Amino acid sequence: MHVKVSHAAVDSIGTPTPYLRRRGLECSMDAAGSERPRILCVDDEAHTLEGLKLMIGSQYDVHTAPSGEAALALMLKSEPFAAVISDNHMPGMTGADFLQVAREQHKDTVRILLTGYSDLEAAIAAVNRGGLFRFLLKPCTREMLEQTLSAAVEQHNLQLAERELLQKTLLGSMRALLEVLAVVDPVAFGRVGRLKELSLNIADRLGVRDPWQLEYAALVSQLGYAALPDATLRKVYHGVTLSNAEAAQMQQANTLSAQIVSHIPRLGRVSDILLGLTTSDDYGGTDVRREVHILKAVSAFKVIEQTTSSRSKAIAGFKALQPPCDAAVSDALLAAIGDEPAQAEVLEIPIERITVGMTVLHDVYTRTGALLIARGTRATESFVARLRNVASSIGPTMVRVARV
């Protein structure tokens, strides 16, 4: 039962009145709670959590957790929090340790430590070590708490705005690079949409947070292929075994993609993912390693998909890969493929009538014999737009496509 408690019942955190010690009393939430900034309060003492809700419940959408472990579980399964405020002295995981883990897993959530004078030295160390936004000493007044949370929410909003600006800037850079790729190598350009689509699907199934670096890596993974000889490209896209010299060319192409991206600020992680494609060994940190495995698996499946006659054969071919891909990534990819609609209709249409979602069922060449569309290419919006621009290089052409 929700019972409204007067704000006069408490005027600082850490000095609860006997009234607040009574069980079952908490501040009622109004209907607009979900529209307010989300704040997570963590403390093993119920009366402290009650006091925090009383102080800030009218301004924020307040959620609580009785321990660091419980808070991390809540943060993983809920919508992002603007800020988290945690007591330091708790059984098991301390507040400082909890906030350190929260920093690694939820970079945009602003972190505040609530501690007593006896833990002051530990709090200072936590600020220096864990990049905390602030720490507050108990007892903490309502005014100080409100000022701190207001500043924390403002910091959170600034971080989100900076990220949005950064991603838009980087996306512009990516589009410029892809425009070059579309002119130099339309086949590679048509391939990136499927790589991105499957990579993001797998990342979502594996709970990868903030997968934009993986998305960019998928988009630019084919840039270096523009330097490959046409004969080598055809072998790559058709899954034909490469000679030692051709395999070396492929390694250089993947390295070139990473080198091109490395010149763009803030894309160091994307470059690391691309470099990971050049080795059969695990590469980089845990997060990068998982993203490398995702892109490797998707690239391998894409080759099989465009060289087999049915989805069931493509799945069987992927399962037979040696060495096998990462088990969790493979399972997620197969689940993603299984959830896709079946290709129910095969059409023969003029090439200029290809629309988004159609899959080309055979290779298409220009008048000079250059491969324009590889078998198995799925049309995206950018691919369709680019295809109209190069249609004059092939003249009137009928193509067989599968339409979902």
Image: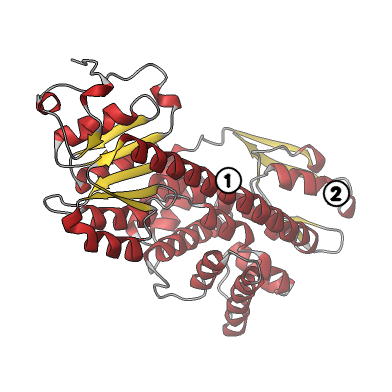
The image quadrant where one finds the N terminus is top left
Residue behind mark 2:
389
Vertical arrangement, residue 182 with respect to residue 251, above or below: above
In the depicted view, which residue is nearer to us: 312 or 228? 228
Residue at point 53% right, 57% down? 213
| 179 left or right, relative to 326 | right
Q: Position of residue 332 (x, y in %)?
A: 39, 49
State the count of labels: 2
- Compared with 176, 310 (above or below) is above
Say which of marks 1 and 2 sits in front. 1
Q: Position of residue 364 (x, y in %)?
A: 75, 54
Q: Name the residue tied to disc 1.
A: 161
Q: Residues within 10 Å of mark 2 (few under 14, many from 20)?
A: few
* Mark 1 nearby-residue class (10 Å; few <14, some 14–19, many ≥20): few
Secondary element at tag 1: helix
Q: Please indicate whether residue 21 sits to the left or right of residue 328 in the image.
A: left
The type of residue carrying mark 1 is Ala
Quarter of the image that includes the C terminus: top right
Q: What's under tag 2, amino acid-wise?
A: Asn
For the residues labelled 1 and 2, the Cα–Cα distance comes to 36 Å
Closer-to-camera residue (176/385): 176
- Percent x, y for residue 110? 40, 48
Q: x%, y% of residue 164?
A: 59, 47
Instruction: Tell me if I can see residue 19 in this picture.
Output: yes
Work out whether 373 lies above or below 233.
above
Query: Mark 1 touching mark 2, by CB under 8 A?
Result: no
Q: Quadrant of residue 192?
A: bottom right
In the depicted view, which residue is nearer to us: 78 or 28? 28
Give the SS element for disc 2.
helix
Residue appearing at x 58%, y 69% in the figure: 240
Q: Name the residue nearer the viewer: 158 or 321.
A: 158
Answer whether residue 206 is visible to the viewer in this image: no
